Image (cartoon, rainbow, N blue to C red):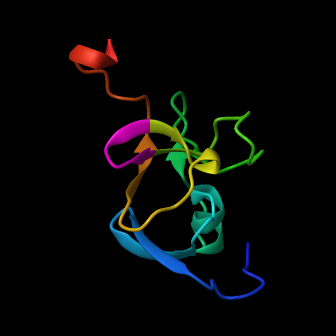
């Protein structure tokens, strides 16, 4: 389990799968979720196995989440901000018409 060394000086609040999470301004989303005790960020596309951050530097893609309705965001590369809505991903991304083609 990941623990914070000290409480955030300047806190921001966001939601993950409907749950309120408090993080330090400047945290990456992956670090904030790990510090909040989140163990599964997504399910694998092939077998549905639970996945969580591995490299924390944008190489492995294990930390993919949906942020404010946009799928396949690497949580290790996104800084938290007040009010963001984050959801875990289940399976492959949904493909719709328009810009996603």
Residue sitting at x 62%, y 65%: 26
Instruction: Tell me the magenta residue range.
Output: 66-71
Q: Does the magenta stretch include residue 67?
A: yes
Where does residue 94 sit, x and y in percent of width and height?
Answer: 32, 27
Where does residue 63 sit, x and y in percent of width and height?
Answer: 60, 45
Where does residue 59 sit, x and y in percent of width and height?
Answer: 74, 33
Q: In this view, does 47 lie above or below 35?
A: above
Q: Quadrant of residue 40?
A: bottom right
Q: Main secondary structure of the magenta part?
A: strand
Q: Quadrant of the N terminus?
A: bottom right
Q: Quadrant of the C terminus?
A: top left
Residue sitting at x 29%, y 17%: 99
Q: Which residue lies furthest to the top in this view?
A: 101
Q: Does the magenta stretch include residue 24?
A: no
Residue sitting at x 39%, y 29%: 93
Tag count:
0
Horizontally, residue 28 falls left or right of residue 88, namely right
Nearer to us in this view, 23 or 54: 23
Nearer to us in this view, 48 or 23: 23
Horizontally, residue 32 falls left or right of residue 68, namely right
Where does residue 23 sit, x and y in percent of width and height?
Answer: 55, 74
Q: Is residue 90 above or below residue 9?
A: above
Nearer to us in this view, 44 or 20: 20
Q: In this view, does 7 lie above or below 25?
A: below
Q: Which residue lies furthest to the left in this view?
A: 97
Residue sitting at x 22%, y 15%: 98
Nearer to us in this view, 9 or 86: 9
């Amino acid at each position: 389990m990941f623990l914070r060394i000290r409480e955030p000086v300047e806190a921001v609040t966001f939601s993950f799968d409907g749950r309120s999470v408090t993080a330090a301004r400047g945290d990456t989303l992956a670090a904030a979720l790990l510090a909040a005790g989140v163990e599964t960020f997504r399910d694998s596309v092939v077998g549905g196995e639970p996945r969580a951050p591995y490299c924390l530097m944008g190489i492995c893609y294990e930390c993919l989440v949906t942020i404010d309705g946009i799928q396949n965001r690497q949580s290790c590369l996104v800084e938290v901000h007040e009010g963001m809505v984050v959801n875990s991903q289940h399976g492959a991304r949904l493909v719709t018409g328009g810009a996603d083609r």
